[in-house]
Image: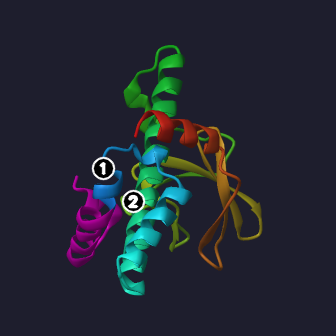
Amino acid sequence: MAPSAALALKKSTVKFYSRQLDRHILPAFGSCAICEINQVQIEALLSGLRQKGYGHGALRGVRATFSTVFQAAIRRAISITILRMAFESARRRPGSSADSISLLRYPFHDRTALVTCCGRICIYKKEINLSTSLAGQAVGIKEVDDGIWLVSFMDYDLGYIDLEEKTLQPLNNPLAQSVKLCLRNVL
């Protein structure tokens, strides 16, 4: 899958980001791992570009490119972490195989919902956005109050959805430490 497909970006946006990467970011950070780049270094690059006479629009473009790159890295790290945890969990269960991951069951929840390829679950004819990282996975949903549902993936509670607003209110990230380690080790 192309990086632009994973991020759902328009062709013109990909071209814009590529231009920013080629002209400004890669010459400055090409040999650095993404987890080694920090805010001070980014601000130093922007300051250098400002001193070279680049305008506010160019600086905003570089900053937007950094933002998109970091968001993609975090999504990738979360996806990798979730998959690793799922495979490890499947291996630990006696008599199970990695294929059993797609057959997750949630016996303590009211129902199991399959996350669509665009990262949504559909309940009561309403589409609620979760995350494309969970596409194709089963999540457990449990009604905790009238119209308020708890969404869980494996052993992790992801957040609450309100059927009226059709939004997910995320809980604290249970994978935060794993994401940091993954960014440090994988990328």
Q: Residues within 10 Å of mark 2 (few under 14, many from 20)?
A: some
Q: Which residue is mark 2?
A: 69
Residue that appears at 30% across and 71% down? 9
Q: Residues within 10 Å of mark 1 (few under 14, many from 20)?
A: few
**Residue 49, placed above or below residue 137:** below
On-image quarter of the C terminus: top left
**Residue 76, placed above or below residue 177:** below
Q: Quarter-wise, where is residue 50 in the image?
A: bottom left
Q: Is residue 98 magenta?
A: no
Q: Of 90 and 43, which appears nearest the observer?
A: 43
In magenta, the rendered stretch is 1-24
The disc labelled 2 sits on which kind of residue? Val
Q: Quarter-wise, where is residue 116 in the image?
A: bottom left
Residue that appears at 47% across and 71% down? 47
CA separation in Å, label 2 and label 1: 13 Å
Q: Residue 53 location in percent, x, y? A: 35, 82
User: Looking at the image, is mark 2 or mark 1 nearer the viewer?
Assistant: 1
Q: Which residue is mark 1?
A: 30
Secondary structure of the residue carrying numbered label 2: helix
